[in-house]
Image (cartoon, helix red, strand yellow):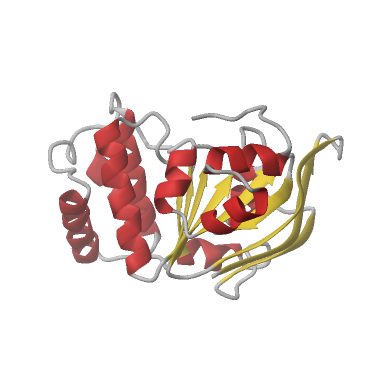
């Protein structure tokens, strides 16, 4: 479970406010969506959670551990699929995944067993032993997901994982995330794509201009806004249609 209270982050000596008092909870056995236009503060919020950025204010905990105070403990406990993916292009997909497994202290036998499982679940057999240089977006995302989950974390953070994916790969990824939810994992999905939220998320946190504009289930957000679609509800709740995508 993730608990965030009054989280804040500024840049350029306080002149740029990226995150401004964000609070929310993400529970185990649910997919929580961070929904907002580009530049809303979603990625910055995730980066604070996975210890890449220190917060300027507020509190956060992941399964009772404060990422700001115990970054190594949090890194061992979570899986992260960042927006940049960050694969090593000179390594094969298998080597990319295995490297992170070794960083997490797994044995070679454990790593090989997990990689075999990911190859089946994510349909990676065809490219698992190819260098990642030249991979498609879909292939890169699959490797990034396998790498993030190699140590079997309870909490998974994904930053716009379907960007650039084709329809079939997107559908497969949605099914995989639903399987993680069924296993009781805590999944946090950052996106600006309405279809992702409608298809996957149990709880939605709408972020606009660094603040939480609204949160709740899709049904609650529709009821609160009086809108007929989630897209219309989003526009009403943030008070603007600027930045709205698909």
Q: Position of residue 63 (x, y in %)?
A: 55, 73
- Direction from residue 140 to residue 216 in the image, left or right: right
Whether residue 64 is situated above or below residue 75 in the rendered picture: below
Q: Specify whether residue 99 is in view.
A: no
Q: Residue at the location (40% across, 49% down)?
A: 199
Q: Position of residue 192 (x, y in %)?
A: 54, 37
Whether residue 209 is situated above or below residue 100 in the rendered picture: above
- Direction from residue 203 to residue 131 in the image, left or right: left
Q: Position of residue 196 (x, y in %)?
A: 43, 43
Q: Residue at the location (57% across, 45% down)?
A: 35
Specify the quadrant of the image occupied by residue 88: top left
- Direction from residue 93 to residue 217 in the image, left or right: right
Whether residue 2 is situated above or below residue 240 in the rendered picture: below
Question: Which residue is situated farthest in the top direction here?
Answer: 134
Q: Position of residue 190 (x, y in %)?
A: 53, 46
Whether residue 139 is situated above or below residue 172 in the rendered picture: above
Q: Residue at the location (68% across, 40% down)?
A: 236
- Front-most of residues 44 and 95: 44
- Direction from residue 235 to residue 80 in the image, left or right: left
């Amino acid at each position: 479970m993730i608990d965030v209270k009054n989280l804040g982050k500024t840049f350029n000596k306080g002149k740029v406010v990226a995150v401004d008092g964000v609070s929310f909870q993400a529970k185990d056995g649910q997919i929580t969506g961070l929904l907002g236009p580009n530049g809303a503060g979603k990625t910055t919020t995730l980066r604070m959670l996975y210890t890449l950025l220190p917060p300027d204010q507020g509190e956060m905990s992941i399964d009772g551990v404060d990422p700001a105070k115990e970054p190594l403990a949090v890194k061992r406990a979570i899986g992260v699929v960042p927006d940049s993916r960050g694969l090593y292009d000179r390594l094969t997909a298998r080597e990319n995944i295995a490297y992170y497994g070794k960083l997490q202290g797994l044995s070679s036998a454990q790593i090989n067993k997990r990689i075999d499982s990911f190859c089946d679940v994510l349909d990676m057999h065809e490219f698992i032993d190819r260098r990642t240089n030249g991979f498609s977006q879909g292939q890169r995302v699959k490797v990034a997901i396998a790498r993030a989950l190699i140590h079997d974390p309870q909490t998974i953070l994904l930053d716009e994982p379907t960007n650039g994916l084709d329809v079939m790969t997107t559908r497969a990824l949605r099914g995989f995330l639903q399987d993680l939810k069924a296993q009781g994992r805590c999944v946090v999905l950052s996106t600006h794509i309405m279809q992702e939220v409608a298809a996957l998320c149990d709880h939605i946190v709408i972020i606009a201009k660094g603040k939480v504009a609204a949160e709740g289930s899709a049904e609650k957000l529709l009821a609160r806004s009086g809108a007929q679609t989630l897209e219309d509800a989003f526009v009403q709740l943030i008070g603007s249609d600027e930045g709205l995508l698909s």
